[in-house]
Amino acid sequence: MSETKSLDDDTLADYIRKNTIETVIGPMSFGEDGEWKAPRIIYAQFQNVDGNDIGQFKDMSRQVVVWPPELKTGNLIYPYDQATK
């Protein structure tokens, strides 16, 4: 919206189709057929979760990307009960 200075769906869609968008999982762009040029399937694991305080999920410090390698931020902990405090 900041790039187009608009909330109009058609304007936003046109911009997204023609430009690369920076996202939390890396740059994303679309091909002529409307599909992603590069797939962005990621596997993540919540780690070091302590109790039930929702505040610990306000950032990505508890969510670790374990695949794909180019986006990896940590290693998978298995069995999962070892991933919690």
Image: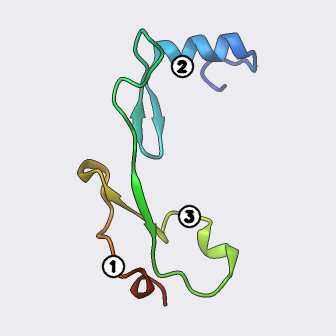
Residue that lies at the very extreme toward the front in this rendered image = 79
Question: Within 10 angstroms of label 1, few (less than 14), some, or many (20 or more) residues?
Answer: few
Eye-nearest disc, 2 or 1: 1
Of pointers 1 and 3, the one earlier in the residue sequence:
3
Of pointers 2 and 1, the one earlier in the residue sequence:
2
Instruction: Pick the quarter of the image with the N terminus.
Output: top right
Colour scheme employed for the rendering of this structure: rainbow
Eye-nearest disc, 1 or 3: 1
Question: Within 10 angstroms of label 3, few (less than 14), some, or many (20 or more) residues?
Answer: few
Q: Is residue 55 left or right of residue 63?
A: right
Labels 1 and 3 touching (C-beta < 8 A): no
Picture quarter containing residue 8? Answer: top right
How far across and down, in percent of the image, does residue 81 sit? Answer: 44, 86
SS at mark 3 in the image: loop
Q: What residue is disc 1 on?
A: 78
Along the viewing direction, whichever of 40 and 56 lies nearer the viewer: 40
Distance between mark 2 and mark 1 Cα atoms:
38 Å
Of pointers 2 and 3, the one earlier in the residue sequence:
2
Could you say which disc has been placed on residue 59 in the image? 3
Q: What residue is disc 2 on?
A: 16
Q: Is residue 52 depicted above or below 71 in this figure?
A: below
How far across and down, in percent of the image, does residue 61 sit? Answer: 48, 69
How far across and down, in percent of the image, does residue 46 sit? Answer: 48, 71
Q: Residue at x 48, y 85 (%)?
A: 84
Distance between mark 2 and mark 3 Cα atoms:
26 Å
SS at mark 1 in the image: loop
Q: Is residue 48 left or right of residue 37?
A: right
- How many numbered circles does the render carry? 3
Going by the numbered disc 1, the residue's amino acid type is: Tyr
SS at mark 2 in the image: helix
How far across and down, in percent of the image, does residue 67 sit? Answer: 31, 55
Going by the numbered disc 2, the residue's amino acid type is: Ile
